Image (spheres, rainbow, N blue to C red):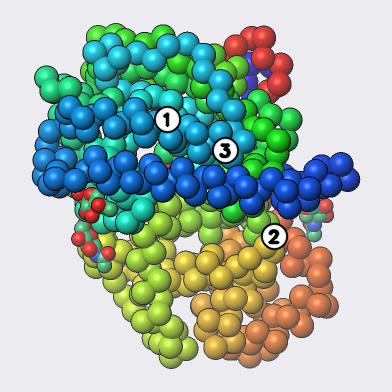
Amino acid sequence: MSETKLLIGSDMIASKDMLNPFVHHLELTSTYDKFKTAFFTIVVLPVRIVAILILLFIAWLLATIGLTGVSQTELSERPLTGWRRYIRRWICFVGRSAYLAGGMNMVIKGVKASRREAPLLVIAPHSTFLDSCISYVTGFPSIIARIEDGLSPWVGRVINFTQPVYVRRDDPESRHNTIQEIIRRVKSDQDWPQILIFPEGTCTNRSCLITFKPGAFYPAVPVQPVLLRYPNKLDTVTWTWDGPGALKLLWLTMTQPTTTVEVEFLPVYVPSEYEKQNPKAFAEGVRNVMAKALAVPTADYTYDDCRVAVKAGQLGLPMTSNMITVERLRSRLGLTRIKIEDSALVKNMLSFQNRESQPVDLAEFANSLNVTAEDGSLVSLFKMHLENEDLSTIDFKKYLLAEYILQKATSKDDLIVLAFKLYGEYFDKEMFEYVMNLVYNLPKSEASVIYNEMTDKPNEIRLADYLQYGKKYPEKIESLQNHSKNSAPRTVTDFSSCGQSFHVPTDDNKKYQ
Ligand SMILES: *[C@@H]1O[C@H](CO)[C@@H](O)[C@H](O)[C@H]1NC(C)=O
Ligand SMILES: *[C@@H]1O[C@H](CO)[C@@H](O)[C@H](O)[C@H]1NC(C)=O
Ligand SMILES: *[C@@H]1O[C@H](CO)[C@@H](O)[C@H](O)[C@H]1NC(C)=O
Ligand SMILES: *[C@@H]1O[C@H](CO)[C@@H](O)[C@H](O)[C@H]1NC(C)=O
């Protein structure tokens, strides 16, 4: 029972077989639950909302007062002192009252360490926006926030009052700067607030702890692990991307009589000498302690890995499909988030139909995607699109084609049809073979056979030909789909950090066999 293989990176259709903590299924099934929700919606919800709004306004007012007369520079350079600091306690009180007004009952276990003992608080598992209650339980520590959040006139004020460390996504140095700033504060002699970090960086459904980002562990100072549990019969809080949205969760949570959140402060974790030198090992050590206390397994993958795997599942493609390999590489490069290709796509949309290729070499390719040409994932991505080994350029339009189909496809849309449509509903033979290889990993020779079965024309195949063939021989299309399950992708890429095993830290945990 101690090891269940996580199937990312092996030949399985991923989402069926792998544990995916980014899902949350929530439906009110029993009539009683529905009735209760309806009743609370009418009778209790309005009162709760009004009370929360008033309390939030008071919190905002307190933050505004606390920030009056403090310049932005002072705020980021020195800890607040004196009465301003005192106001933090009131904010904590008001914040907790707001949660209470919403029906959240907070249970605290263990004792919070002081800044001297542990300058950093490491919070996990992160499963919902409601986790922000932890700020009010821990005396309003500094948080790591996106600068966009700080700009909002309401929430931004309260965030600014925590003296946050801001992350600027558009700044390539951001990661480095954030870590430097965290180090500066935790090592400072000044009495900065503690820093609160959710090391998973994204919400899961608490069924396991995913990879901790090393940011909190670079300073190599003691940290206090803090656990969050929601021991409720109906889980109305979990906010993952494959699950109900924030508003629905808020509504369902506030229409429960009460919702419990349990905060447990674990003993301070002091890194060993080795861990001080190796932030990743330090992160791993802390994660193991937390996983053990929670009695859940750890899973070595990140949000991006899982997102790709789920997409593969939705599209009915195996993880070995070239298409999915492309997506994983893009995801590694951060391209799935910054959407730089979108503008390239828009620019090129019309030119697809003129069929001229748009050759780019590695440097130009890197440049158009705004990535350095040295990046291993970029090189693999480039190689995947090289039609033969002797060439030194790829067709940028073909690259965009993959990106287009992936974005456009929902559920089990026929990817080949989407590709046809982008190209004005017909391909030449070479392009057809290319697409068959991209989607189904079909070698040129086999694609050529199929081509000849679909059309008599020497160098033109229409969408209609393809569809007609599919109608006539549905089993042949199915066997194409089967083909990619059993074939190796175009280039074998190193995904070693994806395909890892599922560790179960405790033996008495029978839930995850
Ligand atoms: C949370 O994720 C696990 C692992 O994939 C899954 O088995 C479980 O059903 C999920 N929980 C909910 C409530 O969806
Ligand atoms: C919060 O601080 C940021 C960065 O210092 C600043 O740009 C922003 O205007 C502040 N937000 C509010 C609401 O004062
Ligand atoms: C490309 O990256 C640089 C920094 O790496 C950034 O300043 C620039 O805005 C990016 N360009 C686009 C179009 O995203
Ligand atoms: C494709 O695979 C499925 C199961 O994986 C199988 O039931 C089906 O018969 C296969 N179809 C063909 C045409 O090989």
Query: Nearest the camera: 422 or 432?
Result: 422
Q: Quadrant of residue 362?
A: bottom left
Residue at mark 2: C-beta within 8 A of ligand 4: yes
Mark positioned earlier in the residue sequence (3 or 2): 3
Quadrant of image for the N terminus: top right
Helix, strand or loop at disc 3? helix
Q: In this rendering, does residue 300 appear at all?
A: no
Residue 179, relative to residue 227: is it above or below?
below
Q: Which residue is mark 2?
A: 481
Q: Which residue is mark 3?
A: 101
Q: Quadrant of residue 446?
A: bottom right
Disc 3 to disc 2: CB gap under 8 Å: no
The percent coordinates of residue 330 (x first, y second) are 41, 55
The residue located at (64%, 51%) in the rendering is: 46
Helix, strand or loop at disc 1? helix
Q: Which mark is residue 93?
A: 1
Q: Residues within 10 Å of mark 3 (few under 14, many from 20)?
A: many
Cα separation between marks 3 and 2: 54 Å
Query: Nearest the camera: 366 or 491?
Result: 366
The residue located at (60%, 76%) in the rendering is: 418
Q: Residues within 10 Å of mark 2 (few under 14, many from 20)?
A: some
Q: What amino acid type should be assigned to the residue bearing mark 2?
A: Gln
Q: With 45 as the anchor, is 375 left or right in this view?
A: left
Q: What amino acid type should be assigned to the residue bearing mark 3?
A: Ala
Eye-nearest disc, 3 or 2: 3
Helix, strand or loop at disc 2? helix
Looking at the rendering, the quadrant in which ligand 3 lies is bottom left
The residue located at (47%, 57%) in the rendering is: 326
Mark positioned earlier in the residue sequence (2 or 1): 1
The percent coordinates of residue 412 (x first, y second) are 69, 64
Mark positioned earlier in the residue sequence (1 or 3): 1
Residue 147, relative to residue 30: is it above or below?
below
